[in-house]
Each structure stands twice: as structure tokens, then as C-alpha cells.
């Protein structure tokens, strides 16, 4: 078995990068939430336009789906993949039950992100895209894809060597799958009348 299979350096590095980016986005959202609580009528720094803003999301019930601000889950949740990534680079090996629990956590995060995307686009009280939320989506989606493949190739999901080898080979397609996922989300936003591409062009140029 190759060193890449036994010590997935690329996957570990991605976990660290995604964790740092995701944690920073959660931190920014948490700060904006405090600002919103202190000044409910003021515009937030992340309120870029009527279609791209944080205020609506943070002030909605969807922004506190478990009774507390969603960003707090990000502040605590992103620590797990960060620790796992660093541990892998340090040479740590985890038992199958640990990987199963880690995969369950990543799957929960992915499911929550999918639900929040749906709510942002289709809920009548929202209909906006939150900048820092989109940053979270951007790193959660590839992390889920990569983790599911990694749990297949490391034997957590199956003991079949053929399945493990196929999952290992499919890892190189995670970036393309991620781009396709982004494209689907953008298309959904455009079809809902949220001119994401136009707003981005206006902001950049």
C-alpha cells in the first residue's frame, strides 16, 4: 500500500486550509451577529447589495435553527477537521470508529449547508445570498466530497480493495465535482432572480 494511501498528505493539508477558511468565515459572521444585536437597524459590513448581504440571514429563524446563532457551530465545528488534518501530518492513525464519527460530523455539516442553501434561495423571508455563508459553503462542499472518498479508500466504508483503489483514483476529480456543485448553486440562484454573476461583476469591476 502506497504512502499516499496510508498517510493522505493532500487530504490533510486540505482539511487544515478548509478549517482555517471556514473558521474565519464563522468568526466574521459571529462578529456581525453581535453588531446586528447592538444596532438592529444599521447595515452590516457584509451587506454588499440587496441580493448579497448577511443581515437577513442572521436575523432570520434559519440563522438560529438550533436556538443559537449558526456561526457558533462553525466556530466549534471547524476545530475538528483542523485537529484531524494536523494529526495526520504528524503521523497519527485513527481507528475505524473514529473515522466513522468524523464522517458523520462532516455529513451533518454538508446536510446543514444544503438546507441553508435551499432556504437562502427559496424561503420567502430570505431570498438573499450571505457572503460569509457562501465562503462556508465553498469549503464544506469539497470537504464532504473528499472525506467520503477518503473514508472509502481507508476502509471505513468497505473492505473491498477494488472499491478502495477506485476511491483513491477518484480523489483527483474532487475539484471538478466541486466546481460543478458551485455551478449548480449559481444556476439555481440565477433562476430565482438572484443575479449572482451580475452582482459579482458589479462588485469586482
Image (cartoon, helix red, strand yellow):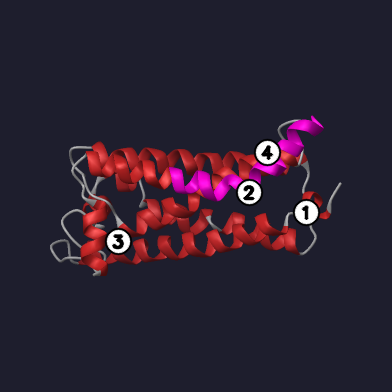
Instruction: Name which residue lies at 43% across and 55% down.
Output: 136
Name the spot of residue 106 as percent of width and height, x first: 56, 44
Q: Quadrant of the rendered structure where residue 18 is?
A: bottom right
The residue indicated by pointer 3 is 33
The residue indicated by pointer 4 is 100
Task: Name the mark nearer the viewer: 3 or 1.
Answer: 1
Task: Name the mark nearer the viewer: 2 or 3.
Answer: 2
Q: Can you say whether 18 is above or below 147 in the image?
A: below
Residue numbers of the magenta segment:
159-180
The residue indicated by pointer 2 is 172
Tags 3 and 1 touching, CB below 8 Å: no
Instruction: Name which residue lies at 37% across and 41% down.
Output: 184
Q: Secondary structure at mark 2?
A: helix
Tell me which numbered mark, 1 or 2, is placed earlier along the sequence: 1
Tell me which numbered mark, 4 or 3, is placed earlier along the sequence: 3
Tags 1 and 2 touching, CB below 8 Å: no
Task: Name the mark nearer the viewer: 1 or 4.
Answer: 1
Q: Is residue 132 left or right of residue 35?
A: right
The residue indicated by pointer 1 is 4
The alpha-carbon separation of the residues under discs 4 and 3 comes to 33 Å
Q: Which mark is residue 32?
A: none
Amino acid at each position: 500500500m502506497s504512502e499516499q494511501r496510508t498517510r493522505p498528505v493532500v487530504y490533510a493539508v486540505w482539511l487544515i486550509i478548509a478549517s482555517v477558511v471556514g473558521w474565519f468565515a464563522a468568526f466574521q459572521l459571529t462578529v456581525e451577529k453581535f453588531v446586528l444585536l447592538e444596532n438592529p437597524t444599521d447595515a452590516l459590513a457584509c451587506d454588499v447589495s440587496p441580493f448579497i448581504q448577511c443581515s437577513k440571514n442572521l436575523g432570520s429563524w434559519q440563522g438560529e435553527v438550533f436556538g443559537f446563532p449558526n456561526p457558533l457551530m462553525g466556530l466549534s465545528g471547524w476545530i475538528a477537521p483542523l485537529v484531524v488534518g494536523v494529526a495526520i501530518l504528524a503521523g497519527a492513525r485513527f481507528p475505524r470508529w473514529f473515522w466513522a464519527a468524523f464522517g458523520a460530523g462532516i455529513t451533518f455539516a454538508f446536510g446543514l449547508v444544503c438546507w441553508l442553501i435551499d432556504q437562502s434561495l427559496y424561503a420567502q423571508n430570505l431570498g438573499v445570498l450571505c457572503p460569509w455563508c457562501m465562503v462556508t459553503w465553498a469549503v464544506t462542499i469539497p470537504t464532504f466530497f473528499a472525506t467520503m472518498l477518503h473514508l472509502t479508500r481507508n476502509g471505513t466504508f468497505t473492505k473491498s480493495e477494488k472499491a478502495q483503489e477506485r476511491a483513491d483514483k477518484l480523489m483527483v476529480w474532487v475539484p471538478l465535482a466541486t466546481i460543478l456543485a458551485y455551478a449548480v448553486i449559481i444556476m439555481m440562484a440565477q433562476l430565482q432572480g438572484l443575479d449572482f454573476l451580475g452582482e459579482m461583476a458589479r462588485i469586482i469591476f
